[in-house]
Image (cartoon, grey):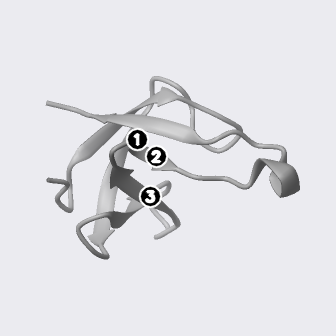
Amino acid sequence: MIRSGDKLKCICGNDFFVEGSVYTVGNIISNKFFQINISANDEYWYATKDSEGIYVRFNEEDHLVKDAFFALEK
């Protein structure tokens, strides 16, 4: 279960998330959706945790950016 304050390591990055970098989980929206903080200025992206893993989905057709995937840091 993802909790606010958990650390997530980016295992597959893109233009917005750097592979190997660690990000902090922000507010929990539901058991599947939560925020990943990207700066100290309360900027965040919405992330999902489901059978595909932990990821931020991007619409490749519109943005030409692939999805970013994460692993929970122990």
Q: CA distance from mark 3 to mark 2?
A: 6 Å
Q: Nearer the viewer, mark 1 or mark 3?
A: 1
Q: CA distance from mark 1 to mark 2?
A: 8 Å
- Residue 27, horizontal then vertical, whole percent: 30, 72
Quadrant in the rendering for residue 72: top left
Closer to us: 19 or 43: 19
Do the residues under discs 1 and 3 have CB atoms within 8 angstroms? no
Classify residue 23 as left or right of residue 62: left
Closer to us: 41 or 34: 34
Q: CA distance from mark 1 to mark 3?
A: 12 Å
Residue hosting label 2: 55
- Residue 74, horizontal then vertical, whole percent: 13, 30
Q: Helix or strand or loop: what does disc 3 sit on? A: strand
Residue hosting label 3: 47
Do the residues under discs 3 and 2 have CB atoms within 8 angstroms? yes
Q: Helix or strand or loop: what does disc 1 sit on? A: loop
Mark 3: give few (<14), some (14-19) or many (20+) Cα within 10 Å: many
